[in-house]
Amino acid sequence: MNAITKDSVAGTLESSDVMVYASPNPGGGRLITINSSVGQQFALQIRASVEAVLNRLNIEEAALQIEDKGALDCVLQARVKAALLRAGAQADWEELL
């Protein structure tokens, strides 16, 4: 199991982008909070993309806050990866693709 050890942020609050806040959540599992301008339509897809990145990096305990402004899925995944890596997650390059 991979773990994050500090708080981090990735992204912006500009239109078509997403800000991802990542924090350690020891013993608390995964906590994902989503605030999105398109949440009515895409909240389930946003959560699935975030979960996919967490699974790929083998992270079981993290608190993520997603502030989405209509970002494409590829942008969302890149921002989540960046936030997790900045927070101390370890990954092989193959896991990042």
Image (tube, rainbow, N blue to C red):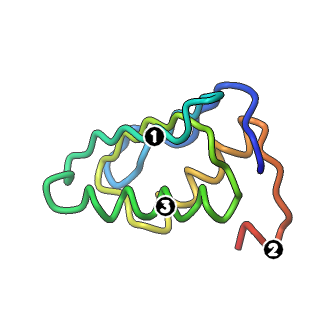
For disc 3, the neighbor class at 10 Å (few under 14, some 14 to 19, many from 20) is some
Position of residue 1 in the picture relative to residue 79 (left or right): right
Residue farthest along the left direction in this orientation = 40
Residue located 48% across and 56% down the image: 50
Residue where numbered disc 3 is placed: 75
For disc 2, the neighbor class at 10 Å (few under 14, some 14 to 19, many from 20) is few
- Measured from the top left, where is residue 22 in percent x and y? 57, 34
- Measured from the top left, where is residue 34 in percent x and y? 33, 42
Residue located 66% across and 44% down the image: 84
Position of residue 21 in the picture relative to residue 18 (left or right): right
Q: Earlier in the sequence, mark 3 or mark 1?
A: 1
Residue where numbered disc 1 is placed: 19
Residue where numbered disc 2 is placed: 94
Residue located 77% across and 50% down the image: 1
Q: Earlier in the sequence, mark 2 or mark 1?
A: 1
Q: How far apart are marks 2 and 1 (CA)?
A: 24 Å
Q: Distance between the residues labelled 3 and 2?
A: 18 Å
Q: Quadrant of the C terminus?
A: bottom right
- Measured from the top left, where is residue 43 in percent x and y? 26, 55
